[in-house]
Image (tube, helix red, strand yellow):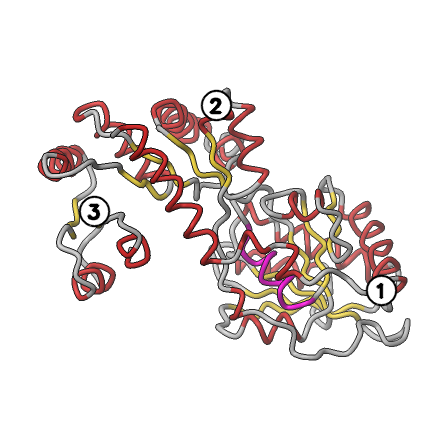
């Protein structure tokens, strides 16, 4: 918010929440338009009242972050005519996947998503997966602005690890870092590692994260008899250290709007074996030698592709790979901020 203000774009904060630290921080930084609204119809009407008041003083756009905010923004636009830009945090295929589990609930959310996708003035796409999903849903390409999530490159770096697999008998250290929910498919990771162990691949698999699937995953580890090789570590705040102590990031998500851990891993210098989701699609398009994208959900096939990837890593040990800070320069936080600033500038000029 401070960055945009310095570049001539004032901002306010209107949150669907109770007051909290972010409101206080915004006020301490000199922002006057800092409000919160309740969920529900009353909240929508209060937001309409506030935004109409603000729009009398200056041109106003809503920058809607995520699914719920976009639902609110679409109704606010209907009542006030104030346009909104959708910042696409929502995993693009989440509701279509959820429909197989909760048909009625997911169908309602899919209808709401169609409503706000149609009414948004612009949609900020974090990754190729989001863009492709939007186009499949009939969103015109001119409405989509491809600006990634934005990463602080200084927080993730290589700590001088030794080359992976110094000998064929040395165990390879594999890690998955994600919220433990069904769409992240960490269970598939455990089954694939169990198959790798059956095939004689020495492997240690650590799973970092918390979530509702923790107990089910713990049971699965015991059922497969891989307790000596698979560890569920829970929440950790030393992600850079964990990545640097690993050889491969194993990412299995069905869908990602971005997949921040993929970029964190790449900046940390380790190899990535990922499902076809989020920013991994961009990494594959760039033919990044440190990244392999797999398809499908058969643990046996995934295990065999994983072995091929290990062989590829071995063969590339002495090859100089592109510096991720150069290869993914457009994902650096400051450059992303400039992209968002320019997106709003174009809209202000068009409506002036």
Mark 1 highlights which residue? Answer: 319
Q: Residue at x 28, y 57 (%)?
A: 6
Instruction: Say if 325 sits above or below 101 in the image.
Output: below
Q: Residue at x 20, y 36 (%)?
A: 59
Callout in the foreground (1, 2): 1
Q: Quadrant of the N terminus?
A: bottom left
Please tell me in which quadrant of the rendered image residue 5 appears.
Answer: bottom left
Indicate the position of residue 20 as horizontal and vertical percent values. Answer: 21, 61
Say what secondary structure mark 1 lies in.
loop
Do residues under tags 2 and 3 come within 8 Å of each other at their CB atoms? no
Distance, label 2 to label 3, CA atoms, is: 27 Å
Instruction: Identify the mark at residue 139; answer none if there is no mark.
Output: 2
Q: Is residue 175 left or right of residue 120?
A: right
Q: For label 2, count other residues whose C-alpha is less than 10 Å away and answer few (under 14), some (14-19) or many (20+).
A: some
Indicate the position of residue 242 as horizontal and vertical percent values. Answer: 61, 73
Q: Residue at x 44, y 38 (%)?
A: 124
Say what secondary structure mark 3 lies in.
strand
């Amino acid at each position: 918010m401070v960055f945009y203000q310095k570049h001539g774009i004032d901002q306010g904060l209107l949150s669907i929440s109770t007051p909290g630290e972010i409101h206080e921080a915004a006020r301490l930084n000199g922002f006057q338009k800092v409000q919160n609204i309740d969920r529900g119809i009353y909240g929508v009407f209060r937001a309409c009242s506030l935004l109409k008041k603000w729009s009398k003083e200056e041109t106003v756009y809503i920058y809607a972050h995520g699914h719920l905010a976009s639902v609110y923004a679409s109704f606010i636009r209907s009542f006030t005519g104030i346009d909104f830009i959708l910042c696409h945090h929502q995993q693009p295929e989440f509701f279509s996947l959820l429909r197989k589990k909760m048909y009625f609930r997911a169908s309602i959310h899919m209808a709401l998503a169609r409503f706000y996708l149609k009414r948004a003035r612009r949609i900020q796409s974090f990754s190729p997966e989001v863009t492709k999903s939007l186009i499949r849903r009939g969103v015109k390409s001119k409405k989509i602005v491809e600006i990634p999530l934005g990463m602080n490159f200084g927080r993730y770096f290589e700590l001088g690890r030794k080359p992976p697999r110094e000998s064929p008998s040395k165990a390879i250290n594999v890690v998955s870092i994600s919220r433990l929910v069904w769409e992240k498919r960490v269970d598939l990771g455990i089954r694939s590692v169990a198959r790798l162990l059956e095939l004689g691949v020495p492997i240690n698999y650590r799973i970092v994260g918390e979530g509702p699937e923790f107990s089910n995953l713990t049971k699965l580890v015991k059922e497969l008899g891989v307790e000596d090789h698979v560890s569920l570590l829970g929440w950790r705040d030393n992600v850079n250290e964990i990545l640097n102590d690993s050889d491969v990031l194993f990412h299995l998500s069905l869908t990602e709007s971005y997949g921040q851990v993929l970029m964190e891993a790449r900046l940390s210098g380790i190899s990535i074996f990922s499902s076809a989701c989020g920013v991994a699609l961009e990494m594959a398009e760039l033919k990044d030698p440190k990244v392999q994208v797999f398809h499908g959900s058969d643990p046996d096939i995934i295990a065999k592709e994983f072995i091929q990837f290990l062989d590829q890593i071995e063969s590339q040990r002495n090859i100089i790979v592109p510096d991720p800070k150069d290869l993914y320069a457009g994902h650096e936080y400051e450059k992303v901020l400039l992209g968002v600033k320019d997106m709003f500038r174009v809209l202000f000029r068009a409506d002036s």
